[in-house]
Image (tube, grey):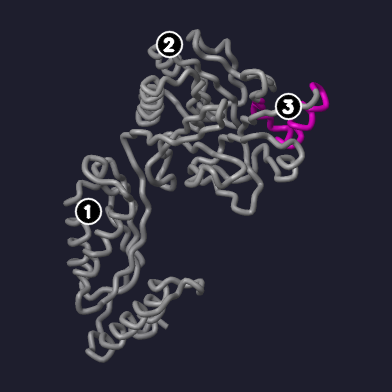
Amino acid sequence: MKIAITADAHLRSRQETPERYAALENIFVQSEKEKVEQVFILGDLFDRDFNNYHDFDQLCQQHPELKMTVLPGNHDSGIKKRFFAAQNIRVIEEPLLEPVGEKLNFLFLPYDDGVTLDEALEAFVNKNGAPGRFILFGHGDWLSGARQSNTYEQGFYMPLSRRAVEKFSPLRIFLGHIHQADKKIDQSAVVYPGSPCGLEINETGKRRFLLYEPENNRLETREVVTPVIYFRETMLALPVEDEILRLQEMIKKMIEGWEISGQDLQKVKLRLRVRGFTKDKEALSKLINEEIARHGISFYDEGGADLSELKIITDESEARLLLLSKIQERLQQQDLRKFLSSPEDVLEEAAEIIFGGK
């Protein structure tokens, strides 16, 4: 058996959220090519205060070979199987232990605002006995020291603690709720597939979904082809002799760091903040706009790059510029990894002092 796992699509109508439907449809198409039998959607398939499920119903009817398992999340905790006409959709309305072969079970715990995942696990075991060797599927926060934040909403939702994991010892745990996917899927007790499409500018980078084979505990990832890819970046401008060339190189490295190219660059919506100092704001703004446009990238904000924190220097004395240049050269020779500050932070502080900001 091969299962595709995703979560947090936050669908509304296809007209309102076309990019989210496109991402989900791409998962379905890839799943069919990969010979996937079931697709698990671990909560928040639909956005809050939305109750017209026709477009998703229709999408599932177009992929009848895929069995869709929908687990309610905190945004769509009230969804029921009877809301859908497609025969390949099931909704996990109550905690469910499902055998997978002779020696493995799936345990589905739908979102319940009144309890933690710890409590839901405890209650299930007390009522039904130990689940044996099992894989847990749910929707909520993993209370670990390296917990990722959910930029879409604040607070904790149906949390799961390390104590509960150690007590009940699931083979694997898959949760929805955190939209940014785990980068290293085999280095955490809990795996979040992430949302199939960025929902807003804070949900950056390419998206992915999971492919899981429970019989051999094999887990892989696949990239979701989405119509839009979000990025947020900050650049430091400095009034050095090669100011323009320096910015061109920074933009080049920024784009290389995204690890995307070609037509995918045309999908990028970029929020760019430029801070620091410049001798010529007009020339700097023109350069940034030209470089970004040259790569086919669009700005997320209508006004383009945010230059509100950029300061203009009027004192261009050679001594001050030389001092800043020397500091820049020395920083390039230093290893600052053991310090909390980055080279850019140090340069900005130095520029503030040199040009009269402090």
Badge 2 crowding class, 10 Å Cα cut-off, few under 14, some 14 to 19, many 20 or more, is few
Residue at 34%, 42% in the rendered image = 229
Residue bearing mark 3: 132
Mark 1 nearby-residue class (10 Å; few <14, some 14–19, many ≥20): many
Which is closer to the viewer, label 3 or label 2? 3
Q: What residue type is labelled 1?
A: Ile
* C-alpha gap between disc 1 and disc 2: 43 Å
Circle 3: element type: loop
The answer to whether 171 appears left or right of 2 in the picture is right
Query: Which residue is the site of mark 1?
Result: 292
> How much space separates mark 1 and mark 3, taking CA atoms?
55 Å
Q: Which of 150 and 279 is in front in this view?
A: 150
Dot 1 falls on a residue whose secondary structure is: helix
The spot of residue 237 in percent (x, y) is 29, 70
Q: Where is residue 43 in the image (x, y as percent from the top left)?
A: 56, 29
Q: Residue at x 62, y 22 (%)?
A: 78
Q: Left or right of 53: which side holds 26?
A: left
Which numbered circle lies on residue 64?
A: 2
- Give the residue type that dot 2 points to: Pro
Residue depth check, mark 1 versus mark 2: number of the one nearer the observer: 2
Q: Is mark 2 on a helix, strand or loop?
A: loop
| Magenta stretch in the rendered image | 107-128
**Looking at the image, which residue sits at the far right?**
126
Q: Which residue lies furthest to the bottom in this view?
A: 319
| Magenta stretch: includes residue 134 | no
| Quadrant hosting residue 216 | top right
Residue shown at 52% from the left, 42% from the top: 185
Find out whether residue 111 is within the magenta segment. yes
